[in-house]
Amino acid sequence: MTDRAPDLHPEAESILDQVDLPPTSALSVSGAREALRDLLVSEDTPDDDLTVRNLSIPGPGDDPETSLDVRAYTPPGAGRPVLVYFHGGGWVRGDLDTHDGLCRLLAEAADCVVLSVDYRRAPEHQFPTAVHDAYAATAWATEYADVVGGDPDRVAVGGDSAGGNLAAAVTLLARERAGPELAHQVLLYPVTDYAFDTDSYAENASGYLLSRASMRWYWERYLGDDVDGANPYASPLRARELSGLPSATVITAGYDPLRDEGAAYADRLREAGVPVTHENFPGMVHVFASFPDLGRAQDARRRIAEGLNEAFGRG
């Protein structure tokens, strides 16, 4: 591990001290998936008032054998807005259970239904399968949100890391297909470009939880070939035009290889006339928002809730 920066936030220090994971790039796919589950899956009984339901919904296309598992987190009451959420994990790992805690926290913070999507993962299912799965789940939410106590007319998309990448891709695909209409996009330290040449990749190549080597490992398994990396549904930052997309909340972390591409995407959205709130948390590391008791994580979730509430017409 590299020497830690002197301005690393104490809460980021606490994350690094408690997370003892082998480098993803040194693991098999199954080993990487299990390591993330060991880190994020809690055995504690949740302490909230949410109604949680596991459902199976139709996947993309007309194949009746293709279905997607989703988990809905519904606050008390009916007609709540909906956040369709795509978990992180480099498109390779992560699942409904690894992000159960974060989805609960977001449902409570924003007082909305969170519909977590178990999209098909790489390398078994390479790009663009996850994009099509994410779009299919979003389209389902805009038609059947009432099934989980949601409002089909107030639907947003969001995700962390690779999930943020999928959320951004869904907004591009929805614009291309003239629907579904989305209220907002939540991009939590998103992957936006198949490139490794930013200052944040150089500054945070190793030692801060997510490494440059791990990101290369993820991309290699997600893409069929390098040409796919130029596709805007894989690299939203490379889209020629970003106008007409839903408003956005973008969260980045100072000690994260993905910091600069997240910031660049926020800038491009703003330049295209899209309302954007971008907040960088300078001393924090990738995945920090998943830790429930950290003050900086609470601040990030509060910013997300504020953006959603404004987009949902709640002021």
Image (cartoon, helix red, strand yellow):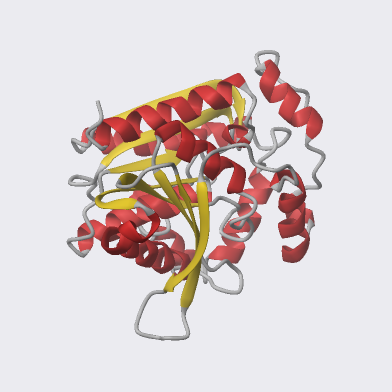
Between 284 and 72, the one lying in front of the other is 72
Q: How many marks?
A: 0
* Above or below, 258 relative to 86: above
Which percent across, then down, holds residue 124? 60, 74
**Residue at screen point 47% across, 65% down:** 130
Q: Quadrant location of the C terminus? A: top left
Please name the residue shown 47% across and 85% down the image: 65
Residue 175 on image: x %, y %: 21, 57
For residue 116, above or below residue 160: below
Question: Residue 279 at x, y = what percent?
Answer: 42, 25
Q: Considering depth in this image, is 57 or 127 the residue closer to the camera?
A: 57
What residue is rendered at 61% in x and 58% in y? 95
| Residue 8 occupies quadrant | top right
User: Residue at point 71% right, 37% down?
Assistant: 206
Is residue 263 at least partly visible in the picture? no
Q: Using the rendered image of the protein, determine whether residue 147 is visible from the camera's viewpoint.
A: yes
Instruction: Give the farthest residue toward the front.
Output: 77
Q: Position of residue 155 (x, y in %)?
A: 30, 49
Q: Nearer the viewer, residue 23 or 228?
A: 23
> Where is the N terminus found, in terms of image quarters?
top right
Q: To which quarter of the image does residue 25 belong?
A: bottom right
Look at the picture and state if 236 lies above or below 11. Answer: below
